[in-house]
Amino acid sequence: MKNVFVLAPLAVFAAIAGAFAVGLTRDPSAIPSALIDRPLPEFDLPPIQGFQQGLASADLKGEVSLLNVFGSWCVSCHIEHPVLMQLAASGAVPIRGLNWKDKPGDGAAWLARLGNPYDRIGDDPEGRVIFDLGVTGAPETFVIDKEGRVRYKHTGPITPEVWEKTLRPLIEELRKA
Amino acid sequence: MRRLFAILLGLFLATSVLAVEPEEMLADAALEARAEALDRELRCVVCQSQSIAESNADLAREMRIVVRERLTAGDSDKEVLAYLVARYGDYVLLRPPMQANTLILWLFPAVTLIVSAAGAFIYLRRAPTPAPQPLTAEEAGALEALLAREIDKPELK
């Protein structure tokens, strides 16, 4: 009986240390989105300079799609861009773009230089829609289901690994639904 | 010494200066005071454990502007917080709300205190320190002799 009490502090310490160890493996910059499983906030954005089509929340209904936040100023977007180009070329999933905080023409020039993976792009120079989406930085990508609800948010660039392990299985599952 | 103290005090105060820029501030002093109180409750979501009152990150600045816009539009303090929680989740609140998934967080310190106090109480009651036994005549004699010898030593005088 006495031995149990002797071991109690050790057990408490082990439990706390275990909880902290798990906490240390988590990425503190990955914040769960408040929008998961909720419909996208209503928005209707104009096109960026030189483009005909803007982007409205209504455009993100009817099929599973990606909503990708980018800016010509964003270094990680540059890293992510070839992956988006590949996805667009293979027709894996439609990608819609949100051009965040770019000066008029900057977003279009960036796409002219690197290629355009988006089938529709909305211009959000002041970040109003960005704010409604709870975006904390670029790039950030939302997986939108057929009903126009947010099902997943990926913070940071989409790498081939993220696509294969996380996004593709999710998109395939959502298509079946 | 006094000057050193003043310098140190100044350094400590310098860290708590608000990041809010003059052009962000509202003309209405009462509204601005409410906005600054709210700023201190809201986490800068791209910083680590900094409020938007303290951070000069772009996003913190935009959040401060939104807080002021909502207040000007007539929102109550609670409505402003709810507006931001709807977008950034509970994470945006520096003081986590008490709800099912935060119960452990809130109750853990109290439970720990109660459990350790109960443990300490039981431990102290279970093992009462035995009352000291008076010395036997033999022990008292030996002690007396030792003490006498110590005092007689010249180097200790």
Image: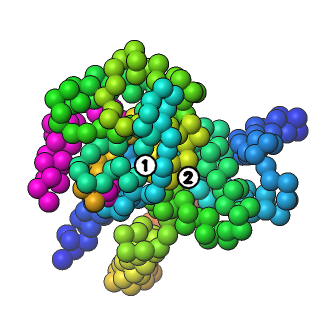
Q: Position of residue A164 (x, y in %)?
A: 15, 36
Q: Position of residue B69 (x, y in %)?
A: 69, 56
- Towards the viewer: B31 or A90: A90
Q: Which residues are magenta?
A: A148-177
Q: Residue under label 1, please give it.
A: A56
For mark 2, give the secondary structure.
loop
- Tell me what residue is drawn at x 55 percent, y 63 percent: B83
User: Do the numbered discs 1 and 2 sit on residues whose CB atoms are within 8 Å?
Assistant: no
- Towards the viewer: B78 or A129: A129
- Tell me what residue is drawn at x 67 percent, y 61 percent: B70
- Tell me what residue is drawn at x 85 percent, y 39 percent: B6
Question: Callout 2: residue from which chain?
Answer: B
Q: Quadrant of the C terminus of chain A?
A: bottom left
**Image check: B27 left or right of B57?**
right
**Image check: A11 left or right of B27?**
left
Q: Position of residue A158 (x, y in %)?
A: 28, 33
Q: Amino acid at mark 1?
A: Ala
* Disc sitting over residue B43 in the figure: 2
**Image check: A5 left or right of B100?**
left
